[in-house]
Amino acid sequence: MPATARRRGAVGFTLIEVAVVLAVIVTLALVLTPSIANSITDARMARARNDCHTIANGIYQFFRDTGYFPAWRAAPSAAPGQAPGGANRLDVLVSQGSMPFEDAPSAWTTGRSGSLTDQLVTNAPGYPMRTPMTPFGWNGPYFSSELAADPWGRRYIVNIGAIDLSPGAVTAAGQPKSAVWVLSAGPNGIIETPFAASILASARPGGDDIGTRIQ
């Protein structure tokens, strides 16, 4: 074996060789990191969209079964297909997770809130149950388990208090109805969708919010 080869085997890689390897690793990291980060963000946003759609479907199924939307903290007995009394009406329904932020607090974060799990999984408010003898009533659970946080650890939130079952796009008082959303505050964690935006003007959530509209 030549002396040069024996010396290289004894001392390992030269400083130049190590520097070249490190430079290649750093270059690959710089190239791949944004792509990986974007893929993770895209996957989270896709999951949030799917979750919002799934929650909206559960709320619709609740409506089909009961004749009203899940909007009460405590539900006294009511005639089949009729909404309970309004004394315990909720402003928002929320999943598990930390509270999203708002630049200017509104009923999204300050209103009377209730749990989506209570409404759609456990029937904690005590809505009248559907039976073989009654065509209307709570017939859940509408999900197999409690509703978890969005991909960023924050609550899904529904401005359910703005639901209005009168026909058309305006209220009985002649005002445009408000858009009702199943909403995630998105990657920035800030709710940027107005709580009471007109149904005539609100085609999509604000900012980077992710949502499914149910009214």
Image (cartoon, rainbow, N blue to C red):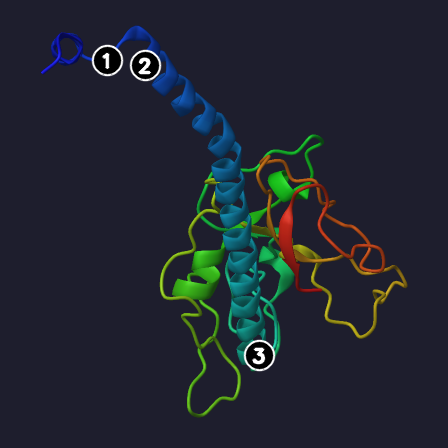
Q: Which residue is mark 3?
A: 64
Identify the residue at horizontal 49%, vertical 26% (top origin): 30
Pointer 1 local density, CA inside 10 Å: few below 14, some 14–19, many at least 20 = few
**159 shown above or below 63:** above
Residue nearest the observer in this picture, 27 or 102: 27
**What is the number of the mark on residue 132?**
none
The numbered mark, 2 or 3, whose residue comes first in the sequence reads 2
Q: Is residue 6 above or below residue 175?
A: above
Q: Residues at badges 2 and 3 in contact (C-beta under 8 Å)?
A: no
Residue beneath label 1, please?
13
Q: Quadrant of residue 9?
A: top left
> Which is closer to the viewer, label 2 or label 3?
2
Determine the secondary structure under disc 1.
loop
Identify the residue at image location x=59%, y=80%.
81
**Mark 2–mark 3 distance (CA, rounded to whole Å):** 70 Å
Which quadrant is home to the N terminus?
Answer: top left
Kindly give the residue lying farthest to the bottom in the view shown.
Answer: 133
Q: Is residue 12 visible?
A: yes
Please give the name of the residue rendered at 53% of the width and 72% of the height, measured from the top-left corner: 62
